[in-house]
Image (cartoon, rainbow, N blue to C red):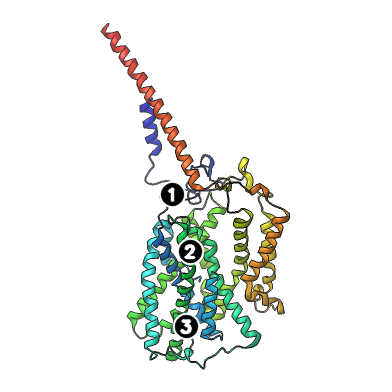
Amino acid sequence: MALKTTIARKLQSHRPVFEKPSIYVDKSDSAFTSSGDSRWSNKDLDPIRRENRKWGVWSLIAYWFSDAFNAATWEFASSMLAIGLSYKDALGIVATGSVTHCIDPVWLIQLPFLYMHPNTLRYLFIVKSILVPICFIAILIWAYRSTGGTGGALFDSSVKSTLSGSAYSYAWLSSWTSVIGNYATLSVNMPDFSRYSKASAKWQWMYVPVLPIVFTFISFIGIAATSAGLSHYGTVEWNPAILISHWPNRACQFFAAFCLALAALGVNISANSLSAANDLAALFPAYINIRRGQLVCAVIAWVLVPWKILASAGSFLNFMSAYSVFLGPIAAILVWDFWWVKGGKYDVVALYHPDGYTRIYRYTYGVNFRALLAFIIGVAPNLPGFINSVNSRIDPGVGKRPYTFAWLLGFVITSLVYLVLCLIWRPTETLVERALLPDEVYEAEARGRLGEMAERKESEDEDVKSMEEKARGKVEESVV
């Protein structure tokens, strides 16, 4: 019996080197998926086991620094100069937007990295956090040395904003919303990486004072380089790729272009493709995992022709403002639902089982109408301006003005509506006395498996003992 069991296990554990392709992804067998059922989850969607969390403190620091050092952060401030704001306005907008805390084309060179596991990607961010800052600081040095230490025409004390009155106010608010829109993506998709972290949550507080300083410094580099470019080439080159094309030294062009490409690669993965992959996997867990989701994102990105975003400074800022229309309400619902409605307590297993006794998060036919209604009401005031930004021929008049501070307006309105709805229709079925966390589930699962292994070992020992007794009996009979 023991021999048969051992052979059966070996046969089950053996997997062929080449497997037949399947539209289905690998199923997981854990407490989060009953009997390997992948209808609601797969290996990539299950909470990460403690032993598989490889991101330490330095990995997270490298992630944030690599995300900060990219062309979009550079272009925030420099594009504001192109629409008529002064460098002081631009720095103030970036600084305040950072405290509240770029989509580039998905290059073909990115495709191999889409197959890498997020635990392995931390090395990419470490490399990027070393090379790209060197490049940006070198450009800052060039900007000052090539202009005799003045920084160029835009830093002249006589240079002021070319806008005034309401045009100045709305340009300021619109640019501020663009900056927040960028950070808003990071605030809602950071769990895509933090789930791989083994560092204590207390380390997260260090980013609060550091990140605004870093982002503002990078934007200052963009302003200085743009100012130097105006002095040398006579145009406000807010796009760094175009600026370096004017340089006479091909080696410098190559190094700067390589670093900009590396910066785009890192931010495309961290802020775009991996987040999209997780969302797609959550929608279609039986068919899409992280790798497949990132490939789908890459294809969709090319279909949307994102290079048109960089056609002008105005179109770049419009795009950055556009998705804050939706991210503000989403962030509001996430914040208030976790901290106020649920009190920071979730039953993690129930999140993966909408049926049976754990259906506490099923809400009304699978929809939390409070969140849906709050989201719609929060987005509605910004829609006229959003439509106008997509098609300027449609003029909603004064109705487009709320769009200039879309994120803040959407966050506040959605917060108020969601809180009121939760007070009127309190979701009592979703409230738990104590949070059930993934580590507890996996530890209990491990204890259960150890118990099963012990019982199986005991059964096998009994089989062996029985066989030995039978053999001994036969020997004794033969002797007699």
Give the tally of numbered discs.
Answer: 3
Residue 312 visible here: no
Nearer the camera: disc 2 or disc 3: 2
Q: What residue is pinned by disc 1? A: 50
The residue pinned by badge 2 equals: 205
Q: Amino acid at mark 1?
A: Arg
Query: Residue 407 placed where, x, y %?
Result: 61, 70
- Residue 204 is marked as none
Which residue type carries mark 2?
Trp
User: How far is disc 1 from disc 3 in space, using C-alphas?
Assistant: 44 Å
In the rendered image, residue 143, in percent from the top left (x then y), is placed at 40, 85
The extreme top residue here reads 480
Q: Which residue is mark 3?
A: 223
Mark 1 or mark 3, which is nearer to you? 1
Q: In 3D space, how far apart are the residues under numbered discs 2 and 3 (Cα atoms)?
A: 29 Å
**Image quarter in which the C terminus is found:** top left
Query: Is disc 2 placed on a helix, strand or loop?
Result: helix
**C-beta proximity under 8 Å, tags 1 and 2:** no
Q: Nearer the viewer, residue 232 or 115?
A: 232
Above or below — where is 180 with respect to 45? below
Question: Which of pointers 2 and 3 lies earlier in the amino acid sequence?
Answer: 2
Q: Residue at x 47, y 62 (%)?
A: 204
Report which quarter residue 174 is drawn in: bottom right
Query: Quick one: which residue is furthest to the bottom in this view?
Result: 158
> Dot 3: what SS?
helix
Label 1 Cα neighbours within 10 Å, binned few <14 / some 14-19 / many ≥20: some
